[in-house]
Amino acid sequence: MEKDRLTFEATPNEYTLLASERYAKSSAYQNFLSLVEHPNEAKSSNDIRGYIAQFSSDGLNREDGYGEPEDLRIPPWNQDISNVLYGEEKSGRWNSSSLLSKKSMLIPLEDPFLLTDMPQIVYDEAWFPDVLGRSHEEAKKGGLSVEELHDIVYKNINSSEILLAACTWYPWNYRDGCIFYELAQIKSVYDLSSNNQIDCCVGNFGLLTYEGDIEESHIACKRYDSINLFNKIRGNIKIPFGNGQVVPSSAWRKIFHCEPSAESPYRWIDENGVEVLRLDRIASPIREATREVYIRQPILFRWICNKEWLKQKLEELQLRVCFITSYERMPF
């Protein structure tokens, strides 16, 4: 899709905001409204919050056991609310926010570059252990350990390459599971401190990365003088794991002078046009769970970089790489 075709030119058809004193303060839409609401705007978004609150009895605030706090959800059964948001955008209500920022908030997070491309399928219990086949006593301990997840993330990487970011989802039992992250940070070679702060970005990375840098939190840089090379990706989500999960940050683009290739936003090239970074997406269906929904199958997302190229860049810039590890039990 051409980037200049991604606009907010949908025709609004009678977007009526009903008066209400009841505001949807805790709904998923609050994240969006609070982000686009400029602090100096004369008109607040409380009229929209009141309109949204009227849908709360229809399941607007229904919990998603596989979601995370930063995710924004516009449920398909409340499409009228999405139309209201588009209509208000078209009227110029949020002109103080950049178009790319608003696209990041409103465009669904599901990435067509990944949804139309099958992941690599692996049937290898030495790589992806059969947690469902473990004894009841083992399962009660919590499925896989951090050490086992670490081994899964790093297994079968070529000696000429290095892992810079990974996210793996591993389910067990009926609803349990965990999500494990390993993400690269950079610091000065003279800075020996460390932290475990993972930054987030919001938006459909595949569709928007050619336009520039999508919204980022930058908490690690502000608080810890660390620069994250990769971010967790969050946004308006309908299909869990329908995107890259972790993606290159603006720092990766600016510091190492890399750009996504013309063929795919998940393959990055240096200033000489040589591919130096790619995303691997690997799924390992569990035999006993193949009749369950897709989300009950293990999947691994990882970014692999040319080791020698990265080493030269780090030496030139006097930087070092350190890694953040995060283990989260799900559902929350």
Image (cartoon, rainbow, N blue to C red):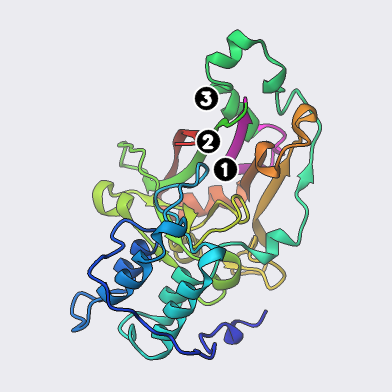
Residue 246 lies, in percent from the top left, at 53, 51
Marks 3/2 in contact by CB < 8 Å: the verdict is: yes
Q: Residue at x 65, y 83 (%)?
A: 2
On the image, which quarter does residue 109 sit in?
Answer: bottom right
Kind of residue sitting beneath label 3: Val
Q: What secondary structure is marked by label 1?
A: strand
> Which residue is the site of mark 3?
146
Boundaries of the magenta span: 155-173
> Which residue is the site of mark 1?
166
> In the visual, does 222 lie left or right of 212?
left
First of labels 3, 2 by sequence position: 3
Kind of residue sitting beneath label 1: Ala
Residue 198 lies, in percent from the top left, at 40, 46
Nearest the viewer among 13 and 202 is 13
> Which residue is the site of mark 2?
180
Considering the image in quadrants, where does the N terminus appear?
bottom right
Nearest the viewer among 230 and 88 is 88
Q: Main secondary structure of the magenta part?
A: strand
Res 72 visible: no
Task: Confirm whether the magenta stretch covers residue 165.
Answer: yes
Tell me the CA gap for discs 2 and 1: 8 Å
On the image, which quarter does residue 217 sit in?
Answer: bottom left
